[in-house]
Image: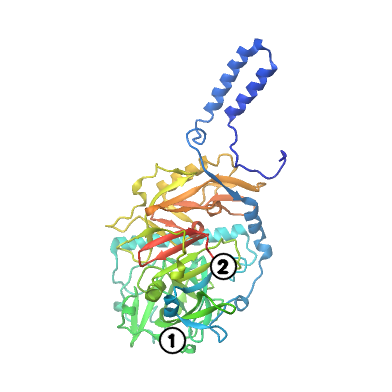
């Protein structure tokens, strides 16, 4: 039997309402008093019942709506967050596990892997995983959360600005940012009149939350890149550096790779760039980000080495070499960049990594993002090819085409359920993409952390969640989160379920840990959604623990819980 002082507080069982407790008290009173007082007691009880019922008028969780709940393990998540600072030790990149294409690893071709129904893969790591080289030393959980939200705000603002620019004017010819090509020591000089580009890219390198470890060049050099479904170009810092930020791996030197080659100005690859220039016959690229950061250099090709998804007879897996992959070799990289060497663009544009390797692997890829509190010992894989699609359990929803913007993955969100109840107060048009203007819609994005929903939808969902959590102790808001709880002393709580419904019956039924998250070391938990006046964005906190499949042959995105390894 659980004692009154037991620290485990479970809300799984339905608690009796105040009216039910009053009724029970009245029965006991009637048993103890004589029949003579029965009429008086019944009159008093009736009055108490009416008063207690009046106090419940504000709540819609009693008789009108029945909520479905699921358990959140408070103690387990809190112990992880509290122990981050204690268990973390700084490890140089050279000591982190990474297999490269050395002579001890079997090398195979991509076409061979595809013919066998296999693919290629790489490990993903969250920026703040305990052993991540990008995690600040001795930072508290609250500090890390505030940093993440600040980066997230910049990213979302940039995405909205980029979309607005495309909506208002589409592509336009503009002068190049003064001096950026000329700064490349004259060998990369280009005339401003040769450039055609949108005003702003809107994406923020500093907002990268997940990183992939892969190898570039021949012989292969291992490096970290930010993974981003909201960007197209693969680029990395290259020697010689005019301006290079500090990165954890050695800067890539193209002269040391026997397979490195520059792209010619007249090639289709060069013409597909948003911003391009020409020096002699070599193509130059430039990418501007919404926070003022930029990268400039040669547009080139080289080999990328990844693991095969097929098991080998010996230890480890075979290395698969991808030949002539387009990439930017940045010599001038300035702004709010992080310790990764560059960025792996996974968007829908023609120059993105999936588009370039697509014909050889069936134009499919998937990822499963592990909890940001989980160390890299729990594998989080980015997979390309047929092996990226699980054999069963995937439900697909069509991709929605935005004629104005080709990079982002748009989906049709049809509704939201809280506690098992569909929120019919959300206007049907709130998630619609305007075909004429390119405004609105719903984007699924690996680089955004917190899911943003159009304000009417967010308010309806938040209010329904609050109504189902009235028994939890409220806490002050935290940054952009306006619905928080003090769960100090609790081992486990039950909270209303939350589900996003997509077209064709594809649902994301979130575990409680995907939407009620710790924000400090004092057991403050917040509802991890926010409202927005721009397009809705499904962020990576809500995607954690799902394998998200991008099938660009059939233009659909699928979800399946688990299957991260």
| Image spot of residue 63 (x, y percent) | 50, 32
> How did the renderer colour the structure?
rainbow
Badge 2: residue crowd in 10 Å (few <14, some 14–19, many ≥20): some
| Image spot of residue 153 (x, y percent) | 47, 59
Which of the pair 382/188 is nearer the observer? Answer: 382
| Image spot of residue 250 (x, y percent) | 55, 81
Is 496 left, or right, of 434 in this rendering? right
Under circle 2, the secondary element is loop
Is 308 left, or right, of 351 in this rendering? right
- Residue occupying image coordinates x 56% and y 58%: 145
Badge 1: residue crowd in 10 Å (few <14, some 14–19, many ≥20): many
Report the label total.
2
- Residue occupying image coordinates x 44% and y 57%: 538
Under circle 1, the secondary element is loop
- Contact? badges 1 and 2 (CB < 8 Å): no
* Real-space CA distance between mark 1 and mark 2, rounded to the nearest whole angstrom: 31 Å
Residue 379 disc label: 2
Residue 512 disc label: none
Residue 431 visible here = yes
| Image spot of residue 353 (x, y percent) | 41, 73
Which of the pair 442/204 is nearer the observer? Answer: 442
Residue 502 visible here = no
Q: Which residue is mark 1?
A: 260
The N terminus lies in which quarter of the figure? top right
Which of the pair 185/438 is nearer the observer? Answer: 438
Q: Residue furthest top?
A: 36
The C terminus lies in which quarter of the figure? bottom right
* Chain-order first, disc 1 or disc 2: 1
């Amino acid at each position: 039997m659980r004692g009154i002082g037991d620290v485990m507080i479970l809300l799984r069982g339905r608690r009796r309402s105040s009216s039910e407790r009053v009724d029970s008290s009245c029965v006991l009173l009637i048993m103890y008093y004589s029949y003579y007082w029965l009429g008086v007691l019944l009159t008093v009880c009736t009055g108490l019942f009416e008063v207690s019922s009046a106090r419940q008028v504000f709540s819609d969780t009693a008789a009108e709506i029945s909520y479905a709940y699921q358990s959140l393990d408070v103690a387990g998540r809190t112990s992880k967050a509290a122990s981050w600072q204690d268990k973390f030790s700084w490890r140089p990149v050279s000591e982190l596990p990474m297999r490269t294409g050395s002579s001890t690893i079997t090398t195979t071709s991509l076409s061979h892997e595809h013919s066998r129904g296999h693919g290629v893969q790489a490990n993903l790591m969250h920026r703040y995983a305990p052993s991540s080289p990008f995690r600040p030393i001795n930072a508290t959980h609250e500090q890390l959360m505030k940093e993440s939200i600040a980066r997230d705000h910049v990213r979302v603002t940039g995405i909205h600005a980029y979309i607005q620019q495309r909506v208002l004017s589409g592509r336009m010819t503009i002068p190049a940012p003064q001096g950026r090509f000329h700064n490349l020591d004259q060998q990369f000089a280009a005339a401003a009149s040769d450039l055609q580009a949108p005003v702003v890219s809107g994406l923020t390198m500093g907002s990268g939350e997940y990183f992939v470890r892969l190898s570039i060049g021949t012989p292969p050099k291992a490096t970290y890149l930010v993974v981003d479904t909201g960007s197209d170009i693969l680029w990395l810092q290259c020697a010689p550096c005019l301006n290079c930020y500090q990165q954890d791996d050695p800067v890539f030197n193209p002269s040391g790779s026997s397979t490195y080659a520059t792209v010619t100005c007249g090639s289709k690859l060069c013409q597909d760039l948003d911003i391009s220039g020409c020096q002699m016959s070599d193509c130059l690229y430039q990418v501007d980000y919404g926070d003022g950061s930029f990268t400039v250099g040669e547009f080139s090709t080289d080999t990328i080495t990844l693991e095969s998804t097929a098991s080998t007879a010996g230890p480890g897996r075979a290395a698969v070499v991808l030949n002539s992959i387009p990439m930017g070799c940045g010599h001038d990289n300035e702004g709010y960049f992080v310790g990764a060497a560059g960025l792996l663009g996974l968007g829908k544009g023609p120059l993105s990594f999936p588009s370039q390797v697509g014909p050889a692997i069936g134009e499919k890829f998937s990822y499963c993002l592990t909890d940001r509190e989980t160390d890299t010992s729990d594998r989080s894989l980015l997979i390309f090819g047929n092996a990226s699609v699980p054999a069963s359990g995937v439900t697909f929803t069509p991709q929605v085409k935005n004629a104005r913007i080709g990079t982002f993955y748009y989906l049709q969100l049809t509704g939201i359920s809280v506690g098992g109840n569909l929120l019919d107060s959300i206007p049907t048009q709130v998630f619609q993409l305007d075909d004429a203007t390119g405004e609105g819609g719903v984007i699924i994005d690996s680089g955004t952390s917190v899911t943003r929903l159009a304000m009417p939808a967010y308010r309806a969902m938040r209010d329904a969640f609050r109504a189902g959590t009235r028994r939890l102790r409220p806490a002050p808001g935290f940054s952009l989160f306006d619905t928080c709880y003090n769960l100090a002393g609790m081992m486990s709580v039950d909270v209303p379920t939350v589900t996003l419904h997509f077209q064709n019956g594809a649902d994301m039924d979130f575990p409680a840990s995907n939407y009620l998250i710790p924000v400090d070391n004092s057991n403050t938990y917040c509802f991890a959604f926010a409202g927005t006046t721009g397009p809705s964005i499904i962020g990576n906190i809500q995607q954690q623990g799902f394998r998200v499949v991008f099938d660009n042959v059939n233009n659909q995105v699928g979800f399946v819980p688990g299957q991260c390894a």
